[in-house]
Image (spheres, rainbow, N blue to C red):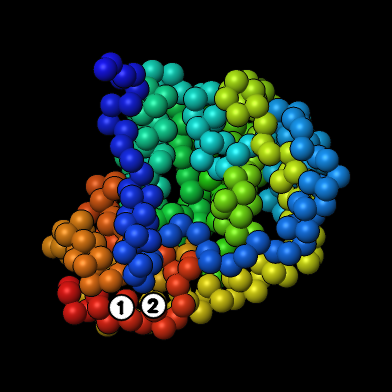
Amino acid sequence: MRFSSRLKGVDESATFKYSRLAKERKMINLTIGRTGFDTPPIIKEATKKALDEGKVHYTPTKGIPELRKAIARKLVEENKIQNLDEEHVLVSVGAKHVIYEAVMSIIQRGDVVAISNPSWVSYESIARLSEGRTAWIPLKPENGFIPDDDFYAVLEDSKPRMILINSPNNPTGAVYPEKAIRKVVDIAERNESIILSDEIYERIIYEGKHFSAGSIYEDTITVNGFSKEFSMTGWRLAYAASQNKEIIEKMDIIQAQTVSCAVSFIQYGALKAFTEEARRDVMKMIAILKKRRDCLIDGMKKTRAVMEKPSGAFYVFPFFEGADDIELADKLMDEGVGVIPGSPFGSAGHGCLRMSYGDAEIEDLRKAVDILKGII
């Protein structure tokens, strides 16, 4: 049977593949790109109330006005992105679909999409589906995967139509300092590039401070959502915002012709994510995640891993010189520990492992490190 050539080179997500295997074999699972915490009760109760009130029908394609207003207000007040109102915000069914809509709206065949190496596995696949060309921009484990002069030089030379940045980062946990993002913006301005800033882990920062590219560059698409911060991965709710309203309007065309709108009652429940009660639950979660990170980092110091302490998200991405990351991941799985090999995240991931502590207790993290020490 003949299928679309757009699928050439687009495979099953490596993260979902290894997560599925880890679940099937019932092991210490460090593959999962989520936390194991429940959604804040205030959000769940508001969602149930919306169901009881019959809020079960289509909403405007961009999302309910109340939620878009709350998102715009948050981005103006907290992220310092100016000139936003609800018409500059689009709510959709998860950050992955938001990113897909953004890339499909901007990229034409042959356009360059600059992606850091390593990066989240779906960025390259989405660029391929849009028929764009990926330019891999190198990051180094000895720098904690923070952009350096080599990164900026390759980025400038790539002449990108779109630059994807992700801070805090998946898979590395790196939090980009403000000066790094400002340098990326300088390059975008010179090349008239669109920046897509994936900020889905924004709140999960242990040291340092989040900085949004959209606060200094109009042609930025800021992507965020509720999955990671509020432990709502299965709810599938995220958003995009841009001072460039035309971008949001074009994304809305794709939204209307694909998913129509995000789930109605979930949008009403998400209004409670902006309350102090929900924020308190998030801060408790972050405090526990920090303890898990510190435990895992302390253990990794006893291995030959090359790594800097990551400042955000809930991943570590250690590099083991000379190791085959796929073989190492498979060996760990045979010993009862599920991790993701680094190479699916880009060539700079060769020899690395992505280890998630989002849904792992401290005792399991210690056991996992002991098993790793016996293999590596």
- Label 1, label 2: how many angstroms apart (C-alpha)? 6 Å
For residue 98, which quarter of the picture?
A: top right
Q: Which residue is mark 1?
A: 369
The answer to whether residue 364 is seen in the rendering is yes
Residue type for callout 1:
Val
**Where residue 103 appears, x then y in whole percent?**
49, 29
Residue position marked by numbered label 2 in the rendering: 365
Q: Is residue 284 left or right of residue 305?
A: right
Give the percent coordinates (x, y) of residue 205.
56, 65
Q: Report the side of 76 relative to 139 (left or right).
A: right
The N terminus, quarter of image: top left
Observer-nearest of 40 and 104 = 40
Q: Secondary structure at mark 1?
A: helix
Residue flagged by tag 2: what amino acid is it?
Answer: Leu
The answer to whether the residues at label 1 and label 2 have Cβ atoms under 8 Å apart is yes
Q: Is residue 240 visible?
A: no
Question: Would you place residue 98 above or below residue 200 in this image?
Answer: above
| Residue at figure coordinates x 25%, y 78% from the top left | 371
Q: Is residue 139 above or below residue 334?
A: above
Reply above or below: 232 against 312: above
Left or right: 221 in relation to 158: right
Which residue is painted at 34% across and 18% down in the image?
Answer: 4
